[in-house]
Image (cartoon, helix red, strand yellow):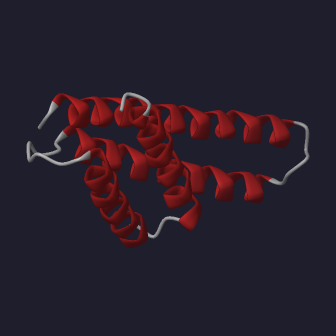
């Protein structure tokens, strides 16, 4: 794997971790809303369950990125390959489509950033 592809994957790992932190912050927001009685306990539990499932799905994607092969690919090939794989895994895990949209935004963001070096 060339340095650019390795850098792409390293940045992706950071971005996915950031996404997990954002989702975990959502749990804190839900807890505050429950305490203020803005939502019911039922809604709170349903939403927390969904957020935890999303976090687990993204953690699984991080493991895949961490174990990425050493084949030589361009950044665009790598992004496309990861997007297809992520879409398949997210669907197979029964996660909402928003998870793919969030992850795909991260892929696009990193690709734009990496193109600045060209």
Placement of 78 over or under 115, stated as above or below: below
Quarter of the image where the N terminus is located = top left
Residue 64, horizontal then vertical, whole percent: 24, 48
- Residue nearer the viewer, 3 or 83: 3
Q: Quadrant of residue 81?
A: bottom left
User: In the image, 36: left or right of 107?
Assistant: right
- Label count reads 0
Q: What residue is rendered at 29% in x and 36% in y? A: 9
- Residue furthest to the front in view is 118
Placement of 68 over or under 22, stated as above or below: below
Q: Quadrant of residue 75?
A: top left
- Residue nearer the viewer, 75 or 81: 75
Q: What residue is rendered at 45% in x and 70% in y? A: 94
User: In the image, 45: left or right of 57?
Assistant: right
- Residue nearer the viewer, 113 or 90: 113
Residue 101, horizontal then vertical, whole percent: 55, 58
Residue 87, horizontal then vertical, whole percent: 40, 66
Residue 32, horizontal then vertical, whole percent: 80, 34
Q: What residue is rendered at 41% in x and 64% in y? A: 90
User: In the image, 19: left or right of 62?
Assistant: right
Q: What residue is rendered at 36% in x and 32% in y? A: 118
């Amino acid at each position: 794997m060339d340095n650019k592809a390795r850098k792409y994957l390293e940045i992706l790992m950071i971005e996915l971790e950031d996404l997990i932190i954002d989702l975990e912050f959502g749990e804190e927001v839900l807890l505050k809303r429950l305490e203020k009685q803005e939502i019911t306990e039922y809604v709170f539990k349903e939403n927390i369950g969904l957020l935890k499932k999303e976090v687990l799905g993204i953690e699984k994607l991080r493991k895949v990125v961490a174990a990425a092969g050493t084949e030589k690919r361009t950044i665009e090939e790598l992004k496309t390959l990861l997007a297809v794989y992520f879409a398949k895994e997210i669907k197979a895990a029964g996660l909402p489509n928003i998870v793919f949209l969030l992850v795909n935004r991260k892929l696009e963001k990193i690709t734009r950033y990496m193109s600045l070096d060209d």
